[in-house]
Image (tube, rainbow, N blue to C red):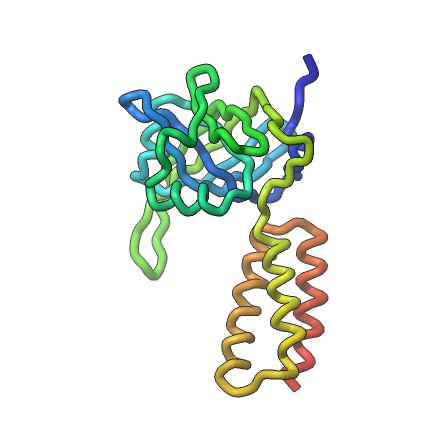
Amino acid sequence: MIFLDLGSIGMEKGLLYETIVTTVNNDHTPNAAPIGVICKNDKEVVAYLHHGSKTVHNIKKNHSFIVNILKDPMIFVESTLGNLSNNYFEQYLNEFYIKNTDAFFIAHVKTLKDVEKQDNFGISVTTVLTADVSDIIKKKENVEPLNRAIYGIIEGLVYLTRMEMVSGDMEKLYRHRMTEISRIVNKVGGVEHKKAMKKISEAFSKYDE
């Protein structure tokens, strides 16, 4: 048996990927939620979870979960709204995965810590975890996990090419959006993403004159 690592499903060290995490509820039914997962190395992931959610409760109870790699937009929407029916799930060992996922793996919790943070919105608690990876299953030959940086770069290019055609409030809107895109790319992207974003920002800066 060949052991697959995270690199075999397209995950790169240090990058954050948008995934669907599936956990097991107290009544042994499946639960799903969109969660950003960071690839720490070939066999380990890190996640920052919203305190008080059903996902956090299940992970703290079971100390394991499944990470699903997929691009189905409705899965992301329905799982966010809490409307993903049991028909979407398939059982694997004592866990559940999404039937039409491109790939999935089991994450076994190593460390789990609640961190309190204060910002303009008040005090919030984030659950930070690290987990070892096992049972990486590829359901499709070509797996491309979602990283928001590439989409930000494409969107940035769209705004850049339209700057010649806008003015006034629309130009202000484009500048605001470019600032946010740059923030996201530099937060979740890799070296090449950041280099590309820097080049876009430099080209965009000529409109400041």
Q: Which residue extends farthest top? A: 1
Please identify the quarter of the rendering in which residue 32 is found. top left
- Write the residue at 44% across / 20% down: 91
Quadrant assignment for the N terminus: top right
Q: Nearer the viewer, residue 27 or 128?
A: 27
Image vertical order of residue 15 relative to residue 88, above or below: below
The image quarter containing residue 153 is bottom right
Residue at the location (71% across, 60% down)? 196
Give how far across and how far down residue 93 sits, in percent.
Answer: 46, 15
Instruction: Name the foreground residue: 103 vs 53.
Output: 103
Position of residue 43 measured from the top left corner of the image (x, y, whole percent)? 61, 27
Q: Is residue 83 above or below residue 209?
A: above
Q: Is residue 187 above or below residue 116?
A: below
Q: To which quarter of the image does residue 141 belong? A: top right
Say left or right for 45 vs 81.
Answer: right
At x 55% / y 57%, what residue is drawn?
184
> Residue 68 at what x, y percent from top left?
51, 33
Q: Where does the C terminus fall, quadrant-wise?
A: bottom right
Q: How many marks?
A: 0
Residue 29, placed above or below residue 208:
above
The residue at 62%/27% (across/down) is 138
Tell which of 92 and 113 is nearer to you. 92
Residue 45 percent across, percent down from the top left: 55, 33
The front one of 71 and 193 is 71
